[in-house]
Amino acid sequence: MSVAASPVSPNEAAGASQTVRVQLRLRELILSGELAPGNRIAELALVELLSASRTPIRAALVRLQEEGLLDALPNGGFAVKDFSEADIHDAIELRGTLEGLAARLAAERGISTDLLIAARTCLDQIDQLLTHSALSEESFSGYVTQNGLFHELLAKMSGSAVVQRQIQRAATLPFASPNGFVMSRSTGPDARDVLVVAQEQHRGVMEAIVKREGARAEALMREHARIAHRNLGRALQSQRALQLLPGASLIRRRAATKT
């Protein structure tokens, strides 16, 4: 005999909505650098700044710690976290490994016609965005949208709620999302070339999935994540690129060696 779930009260729904609002605003403050790495976050100051009560603020802080943006302090409270280049590299590698698994499962298990059509439509949209040799800010923004959608569809193609959930968690790690470094490359002379290579890999993965070539699909998707590694390196070498990277202030740069 199944037990019906208790209905959510209006107060509970309002509290959850406020927590999400506070969480999104706090993430913006962190990624913009307004809340600097290492600084303890004062709850009372956030009450006034965000016009919210302490309960949703505390809940939002816990969620941001789970996302990896905050450190819990030994004596209570939270501080904004910073990230080494190695941390970011590992986060990207983790996402690539999980998406590789998703691609292999999709190839081995097969995918629905609806998902196949949605993925092909998404990739057709990207092809249209990459038609011109010089890409506008609007083109890059469109690419970000379609690229994010393709990666979401890939996770669904795995046919595994477990894998899909783990990919979503990995993508929330700072700088590990599929679009983590896309906009940071929008100013370089080879900006379009990088996206063209990424799109070729998208097409290759879909071809392998349709042909039921699991090992090839997995290898291509893991290689696809390497583009983010290269974009990280390029971004760290360019002050202009870093200015376009959300959360750049959180990156702990290696000290220059003296000769």
Image (cartoon, rainbow, N blue to C red):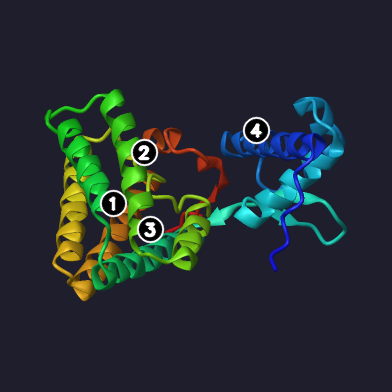
Residue type of the residue flagged with mark 2: Ser
Q: Secondary structure at mark 1?
A: helix
Looking at the rendered image, the disc whose residue lies closer to the viewer, 4 or 2, is 4
How far apart are labels 3 and 1 at the CA level? 11 Å
Residue type of the residue flagged with mark 4: Arg
- In the picture of the structure, the residue carrying the numbered disc 2 is 184
Residue type of the residue flagged with mark 3: Ala
- In the picture of the structure, the residue carrying the numbered disc 3 is 155
Looking at the rendered image, the disc whose residue lies closer to the viewer, 3 or 1, is 1
Q: Secondary structure at mark 3?
A: helix
Q: Is residue 39 visible?
A: no
How far apart are labels 4 and 3 at the CA level? 27 Å
Mark 1 or mark 4: name the one nearer the start of the chain.
4
Mark 3 or mark 1: name the one nearer the start of the chain.
1
Give the farthest residue toward the front.
1
- In the picture of the structure, the residue carrying the numbered disc 1 is 115
Mark 2 or mark 3: name the one nearer the start of the chain.
3
Q: Secondary structure at mark 4?
A: helix
- In the picture of the structure, the residue carrying the numbered disc 4 is 25
Looking at the rendered image, the disc whose residue lies closer to the viewer, 1 or 4, is 1
Say which quadrant the C terminus sits in: bottom left
Q: Residue at point 38% right, 50% down?
A: 152
Q: Residue at point 66% right, 49% down?
A: 64
- Tell me: 89 left or right of 229: right
In the rendered view, would you say 30 is above or below 52? below
Q: Is residue 25 visible?
A: yes
**Mark 2 in CB contact with mark 3 (< 8 angstroms):** no
Looking at the rendered image, the disc whose residue lies closer to the viewer, 2 or 3, is 3
Q: Label 2 crowding class (10 Å Cα cut-off): few <14, some 14-19, many 20+?
A: many
How far apart are labels 4 and 2 at the CA level? 22 Å
Residues 209 and 169: in front is 209
